[in-house]
Image (cartoon, grey):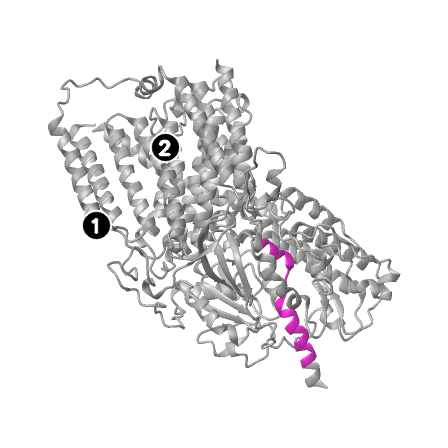
């Protein structure tokens, strides 16, 4: 692929990401906002692939697809807006939002000028995915696995506790944690 | 320049294969339907009917609803068909005959399957209609449940290949197909394959109890495109199953590409027959079975496959 | 060709039989149709709903009225545009569709004005109806209300009206439902124009042996064969509701082919249905009705599936001579109702084979395939009040399965009344 084409693709992805990112705040629906955000992330994923980080780019798209859908559904569930079909105003606390947005833009945009980046092009790795895996997990496989299992059991535990037929009885019957004294928990 | 020509040929080949696959699914599905119904086969009718009904849908008016999200409505079938094309493009016909073989093929395929739920959700959400929306939410529940067992079933095939590339996954099956090496893999994959393209027993988002679900408001060309995209996804799922579990091009006597096509047709037969022979599942049951049975089974499949490699 | 069919009074079987023709494709949504086929008489209360249905069919479209002996002067005659046909329906419809596509026949213009329910411009920068993020009444459309859900949260409920031409429901049934996600939290059944008798049944001769048996002696063999056929027709419909349309057509063909005394095909069908899980995972434990709730309703197979040995035939001397015993199931769920109807179809065929020339004595009431039929009405009208309590708390898919399993025939009541009315006029 020649440089011109690569540049064209990069700018297409970049422009797409920025435009859809802007649209997130200019739309009137939670669903559209979520899907614009997904499109923005997909563009970033494309740029990552273009930079040779194939695995990271595709995983970004893979994870964001599920996450955006869950986020959209949860948003709709807790807003009084049937299924996000009715229009709504997606922005609030304007002054704070504008200040925070401008501040973080200035901070992030100034980084390239303040940081001195190393000036030696790295060779394209043969097995980018394998190297990434070694880099991430090489010395800390056990730590990652332990953390993963701990997170999984936390999630299962949270689901069990939040369930209607929870650990301490059915939710609407005023379920109560059993006490240490025998027989005291039977009062409910 | 030849680099671009090769890319053009590959894209055209994937498109042609997908079109042929969609037509084949339409005929094959009617054939199985006629066999189940016990009606005498009229081959000329069987072959012509998909073309006729497509032509009718192409000339019908495209109706719209009150305040739909028109761009999303138009985008959904295109996105769905595009994802099917992405998945099919990575299925090798032979060791050197594949449209594209990214080193992270498995991840690209997974991302395509994950994006399917966005396509279906958009399709149901955009017409601003209650039954369509209901279908979209059902697919959300269905998709979030099948994603994990689906990815785990596919992940187990990556282990013996020690590579994420689909060509390498097929290559590693020279001596032993994954369907034998991981007996739980193919059944898991087929169950979730039916769920991905929501066919037959897992047709919850477009089910008849919702009078068509996400496609209830589709008419004319949009109905035709949505049907075609669903069939295309079924073809891609079957082709990927043939590659990942049935040894792709490996097989005696016949040429590699012939084996790939035969295996894909066999899997399509299983998927389509399930649509005519199994009653629709209740969504609650499917979600329960996914989380309680399929995920542990898929995890076990991964652990056992990994243990054999140690 | 894609046809959206509306089965009016007394035309359920004729419309169902259209499915057997390979050219006919009865579709679930008007958006997929080119032809709106209206069979029999439709109560005038449904005129507006029918017009809306007509307008949602994409161009080119055509309305076809198949009167099937409906009284002349029915209001549908004044439906703005329609073609009336009497027989050879598939052939005529094919010809009409060809004319539509070639432009020889103009597509029908809409009947109702194409205007929005409320103007699409509200208060606020996005018309969201207020100044806050969501407040107010956007575009004049009421917001959903919050309601408690089964997980102890307070979430949105979506009000939804289903009917009167929803393809899985009997024509005329309208549900006012409130959905919280997939769950029906509130259900109300609207007054049904077929039940309230605004439409008179057809005066055709040979209306069916059960209606005739109300007033004249009918041979047991004929009654029992008709019963077995009615049960199999229900199975065909129920299979289509389980996404098994092709298998449904096989059963429909079987329904027209079965012979008295030969119950083997039905028994093998029952085995096939067990294997396809139509009797299993889609229905087991769904729509359970306690026997006490059905006491005295004369609900036929529905009552017997809940364990009530409630069958008029057991009191009939002619049936007792044949050694008739009502079949009952214990579970009372949708699966039990499937099994019940298959078992009764088998039993009926076997009875029909042994009935000889025995005839019923008309007593003014008869055990029809759906339950106790009287001139005052059929079982459907008596089952309707049970529906809200039955469906509340169900998921939508289960609610449809349950309603299908009840086999409501709303116009049976009006047909019986129409017959009585016709006789009163004649005498």
Q: Assess whether residue C419 is covered by the magenta stretch.
A: yes
Residue A137 image-quadrant placement? top left
Residue nearest the viewer, comparing C15 with C335: C335
Tell me the chain of label 2: B
Q: Which residues are magenta?
A: C401-421
Q: Residue at x 70, y 69 (%)?
A: C208
Mark 1 residue element: helix
Label 2 – label 1 distance at C-alpha: 47 Å
Q: Assess whether residue B138 is covered by the magenta stretch.
A: no
Tell me whether marks 2 and 1 sit on the same chain: no
> Is C103 located above or below residue A17 in the figure?
below
Residue C19 appears left or right of A48: right
> Is C313 located above or below residue B201 in the figure?
below
Residue nearest the viewer, comparing B17 with A84: A84
Q: Nearer the viewer, mark 2 or mark 1?
A: 1
> Is C188 located above or below residue A126 in the figure?
below
Q: Residue at x 75, y 60 (%)?
A: C225
Q: Which residue is mark 2?
A: B89
Q: Residue A94 shows which numbered tag?
A: 1
Horizontal and vertical percent for residue C54?
44, 68
Mark 2 residue element: helix
Horizontal and vertical percent for residue C63?
47, 69
Whether residues under marks 2 and 1 lie with C-beta atoms below 8 angstroms apart, the answer is: no
Residue C112 appears left or right of A166: left
Whether residue C80 can be seen here? yes
């Amino acid at each position: 692929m020649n440089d011109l084409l690569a540049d064209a693709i990069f700018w297409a992805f970049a422009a797409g990401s920025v435009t859809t990112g802007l649209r997130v705040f200019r739309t009137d629906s939670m669903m559209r906002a979520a899907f614009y955000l997904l499109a923005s992330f997909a563009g970033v994923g494309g740029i990552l692939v273009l930079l040779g980080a194939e695995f990271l780019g595709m995983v970004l798209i893979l994870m964001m697809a599920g996450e955006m859908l869950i986020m959209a559904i949860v948003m709709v569930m807790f807003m009084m807006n049937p299924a996000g079909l009715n229009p709504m105003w997606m922005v609030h606390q304007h002054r704070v939002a504008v200040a925070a947005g401008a501040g973080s833009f200035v901070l992030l945009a100034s980084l390239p000028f303040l940081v001195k980046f190393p000036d030696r092009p790295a060779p394209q790795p043969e097995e980018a995915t394998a190297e990434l895996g070694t880099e991430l997990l090489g010395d800390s496989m056990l730590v990652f696995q332990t953390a993963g299992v701990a997170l999984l059991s936390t999630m299962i535990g949270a689901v069990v506790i939040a369930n209607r037929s929870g650990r301490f009885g059915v939710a609407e019957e005023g379920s109560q944690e059993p006490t240490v004294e025998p027989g005291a928990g039977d009062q409910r | 320049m030849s680099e671009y020509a090769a890319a053009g040929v590959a894209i055209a080949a994937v498109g042609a294969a997908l079109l042929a696959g969609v037509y084949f699914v339409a005929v094959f599905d009617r054939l199985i339907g006629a066999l189940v119904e016990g009606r005498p086969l009229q081959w000329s009718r069987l072959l012509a009917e998909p073309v006729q009904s497509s032509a009718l849908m192409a000339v019908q008016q495209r109706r719209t609803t009150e305040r739909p999200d028109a761009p999303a409505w138009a985008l959904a079938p295109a996105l769905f068909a595009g994802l099917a094309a992405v998945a099919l493009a990575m299925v090798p016909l032979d060791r050197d005959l594949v449209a594209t073989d990214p080193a992270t093929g498995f991840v690209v395929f997974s991302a395509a399957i994950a994006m399917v739920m966005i396509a279906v959700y958009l399709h149901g959400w955009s017409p601003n209609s209650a039954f369509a929306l209901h279908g979209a939410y059902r697919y959300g529940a269905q998709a979030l449940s099948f994603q994990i067992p689906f990815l785990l079933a596919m992940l187990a095939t990556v282990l013996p290949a020690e590579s994420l590339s689909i060509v390498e996954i097929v290559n590693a099956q020279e001596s032993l197909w994954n369907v034998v090496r991981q007996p739980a893999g193919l059944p898991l994959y087929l169950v979730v394959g039916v769920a991905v393209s929501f066919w037959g027993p897992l047709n919850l988002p477009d089910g008849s109890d919702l009078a068509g679900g996400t496609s209830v408001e589709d008419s004319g060309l949009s109905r035709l495109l949505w049907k075609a995209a669903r069939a295309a996804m079924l073809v891609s799922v079957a082709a990927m199953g043939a590659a990942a579990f049935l040894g792709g091009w490996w097989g005696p006597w016949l040429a590699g590409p012939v084996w790939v096509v035969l295996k894909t047709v066999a899997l399509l037969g299983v998927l389509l027959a399930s649509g005519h022979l199994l009653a629709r599942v209740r969504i609650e049951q499917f979600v329960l079975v996914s989380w309680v049975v399929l995920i542990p089974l898929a995890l076990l499949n991964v652990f056992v496959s990994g243990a054999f490699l140690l | 060709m894609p046809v959206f069919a509306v089965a009016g009074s007394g035309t359920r079987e004729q419309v169902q039989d259209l499915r057997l023709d390979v050219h006919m494709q009865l579709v679930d949504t008007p958006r997929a149709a080119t032809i709106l086929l209206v069979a029999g008489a439709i109560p005038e209360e449904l005129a507006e709903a029918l017009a809306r249905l007509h307008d949602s069919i994409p161009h080119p479209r055509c309305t076809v009225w198949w009167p099937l002996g409906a009284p002349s002067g029915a209001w549908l005659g004044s439906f703005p545009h329609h073609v009336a046909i009497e027989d050879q329906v598939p052939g005529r419809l094919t010809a009409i569709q060809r004319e539509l596509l070639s432009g020889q026949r103009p597509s029908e213009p809409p009947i109702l004005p194409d205007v929005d329910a409320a103007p699409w411009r509200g208060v606020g920068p996005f018309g969201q109806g207020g100044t806050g993020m969501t407040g107010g009444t956007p575009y004049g459309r009421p917001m959903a209300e919050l309601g408690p859900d089964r997980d102890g949260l307070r979430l949105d409920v979506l009000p939804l009206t289903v009917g009167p031409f929803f393809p899985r429901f009997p024509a005329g049934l309208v549900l006012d439902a409130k959905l919280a996600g997939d769950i029906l939290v509130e259900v109300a059944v609207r007054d049904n124009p077929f039940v309230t008798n605004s439409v008179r049944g057809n005066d055709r001769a040979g209306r069916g042996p059960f209606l005739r048996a109300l007033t004249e002696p009918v041979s047991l063999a004929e009654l029992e064969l008709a019963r077995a056929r009615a049960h199999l027709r229900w199975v065909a419909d129920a299979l289509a509701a389980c996404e098994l349309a092709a298998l449904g057509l096989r059963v429909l063909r079987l329904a027209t082919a079965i012979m008295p005394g030969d119950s083997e095909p039905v028994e093998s069908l029952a085995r096939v249905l067990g294997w396809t899980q139509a009797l299993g995972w889609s229905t087991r434990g769904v729509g359970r009705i306690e026997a006490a709730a059905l006491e005295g309703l004369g609900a036929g197979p529905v009552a017997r599936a809940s364990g009530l040995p409630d069958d008029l035939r057991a009191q009939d001397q002619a049936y007792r001579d044949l050694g008739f015993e009502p079949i009952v199931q214990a579970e009372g769920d949708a699966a039990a109702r499937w099994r019940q109807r298959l078992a009764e179809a088998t039993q009926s065929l076997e009875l029909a084979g042994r009935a000889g020339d025995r005839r019923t004595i008309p007593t003014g009431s008869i055990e029809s395939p759906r339950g106790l039929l009287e001139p005052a009405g059929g079982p459907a009208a008596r089952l309707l009040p049970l529906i809200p309590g039955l469906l509340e708390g169900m998921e939508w898919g289960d609610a449809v399965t349950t309603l299908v399993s009840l086999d409501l025939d709303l116009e049976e009541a009006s047909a019986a009344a129409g017959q009585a009315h016709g006789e009163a006029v004649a005498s």
